[in-house]
Image: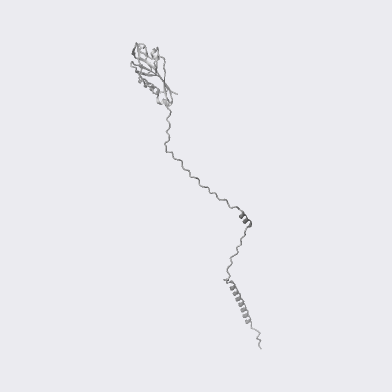
C-alpha cells in the first residue's frame, strides 16, 4: 500500500524555490510602491533655521541714525588776473650832470686897470714881439664872439675832469694862431676841446700906444670841472 503523505524530494525543492520567489516578488513590489512619489501631498519646503542675536537687535534698535554726510561745495571759480597790455615803462634817462668850466685867471704881467676889471674866460701871460717891446695892454682873456667851451661827452660820461694850458699868438684882429699845448691832464679829449675852443675864439688884441699889436705866446689855462 502506498503512503500518499510521502512526497518526492523534488517536490520539496520546487516548493521551497516557489516560496523564495514569492517572497522576492513581494519585497520588490513593496520597494516599487514605496519609491513612487505621493502626488496628493505637496512638498514641504526645507525648514530654515535663523539665529537672532537679541543683544545685537537691541543695540541696533537703540543706536542713533548715522550723521548725514556733509557735501562740500566745489570752490568758486577764480577769474585769471587781467593781462596787462600796456607797454612797460621806459627806463628813465640818466641824470644830466651839469658841467661847468672853471676859468683860471693867472696874474698878467703889468696888467692895465681896464684889463683887471673886465671878466675873462681864460687868462694867461703873453709877450709881444721882442723888436716891438712889451705891449701897454695884453690881449684879452674872454672871447668877444661868445665862443663856448664844450665839455667832452666821453669824459663827462666817465665823470672825469681835466686841465689844459695853451700857448697862442693873438693877432691884431683878435684871432689866435700857432696854438700849442704846454701841459694837459685828464685825457686827450680835453686837449682837443681846448684847441677847438681857442681856434674859434676872438679876443681883444693887445695894444701899444693905443694901436693893436700882435702878442706872442699868450698863455690860456682852461680847467674842465663837473659841477656838484
Residue 131 shows in the view:
no
Q: Quadrant of the N terminus?
A: bottom right
> Based on the displayed image, in which of its 4 quarters is residue 163 positioned?
top left
Q: What percent of the width, then of the height, locates residue 189?
A: 40, 24
> Based on the displayed image, in which of its 4 quarters is residue 42 positioned?
bottom right
Number of dots carrying numbers: 0
Residue situated in front as seen by the camera: 188 or 161: 161
> Based on the displayed image, in which of its 4 quarters is residue 143 positioned?
top left
Is 34 drawn above or below residue 95 in the view shown? below
- Taking the image as shown, residue 129 lies to the left or right of residue 33, namely left
Residue situated in front as seen by the camera: 195 or 73: 73
Q: What percent of the width, then of the height, locates residue 190?
A: 40, 22
Q: Quadrant of the C terminus?
A: top left
- Residue at the far bottom: name it: 1
Residue 156 shows in the view:
yes
Q: What percent of the width, then of the height, locates residue 183?
A: 41, 19
Q: What percent of the width, then of the height, locates residue 142?
A: 38, 18
Q: Colour scheme of this structure image? A: one colour
Residue situated in front as seen by the camera: 176 or 71: 71
- Taking the image as shown, residue 46 lies to the left or right of residue 117, namely right
Amino acid at each position: 500500500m502506498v503512503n500518499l503523505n510521502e512526497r518526492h524530494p523534488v517536490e520539496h525543492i520546487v516548493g521551497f524555490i516557489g516560496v523564495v520567489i514569492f517572497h522576492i516578488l513581494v519585497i520588490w513590489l513593496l520597494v516599487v510602491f514605496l519609491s513612487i512619489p505621493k502626488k496628493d501631498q505637496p512638498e514641504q519646503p526645507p525648514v530654515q533655521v535663523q539665529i537672532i542675536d537679541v543683544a545685537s537687535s537691541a543695540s541696533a534698535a537703540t543706536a542713533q541714525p548715522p550723521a548725514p554726510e556733509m557735501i562740500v561745495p566745489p570752490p568758486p571759480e577764480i577769474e585769471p588776473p587781467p593781462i596787462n597790455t600796456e607797454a612797460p615803462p621806459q627806463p628813465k634817462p640818466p641824470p644830466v650832470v651839469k658841467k661847468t668850466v672853471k676859468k683860471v685867471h693867472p696874474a698878467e704881467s703889468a696888467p692895465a686897470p681896464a684889463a683887471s676889471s673886465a671878466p675873462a674866460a681864460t687868462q694867461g701871460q703873453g709877450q709881444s714881439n721882442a723888436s716891438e717891446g712889451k705891449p701897454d695892454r695884453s690881449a684879452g682873456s674872454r672871447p668877444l664872439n661868445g665862443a663856448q667851451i664844450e665839455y667832452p661827452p666821453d669824459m663827462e660820461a666817465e665823470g672825469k675832469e681835466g686841465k689844459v694850458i695853451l700857448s697862442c699868438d693873438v693877432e691884431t684882429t683878435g684871432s689866435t694862431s700857432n696854438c700849442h699845448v704846454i701841459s694837459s691832464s685828464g685825457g686827450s679829449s680835453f686837449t682837443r676841446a681846448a684847441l677847438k675852443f681857442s681856434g674859434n675864439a676872438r679876443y681883444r688884441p693887445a695894444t701899444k700906444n693905443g694901436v693893436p699889436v700882435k702878442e706872442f705866446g699868450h698863455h690860456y689855462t682852461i680847467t674842465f670841472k663837473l659841477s656838484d
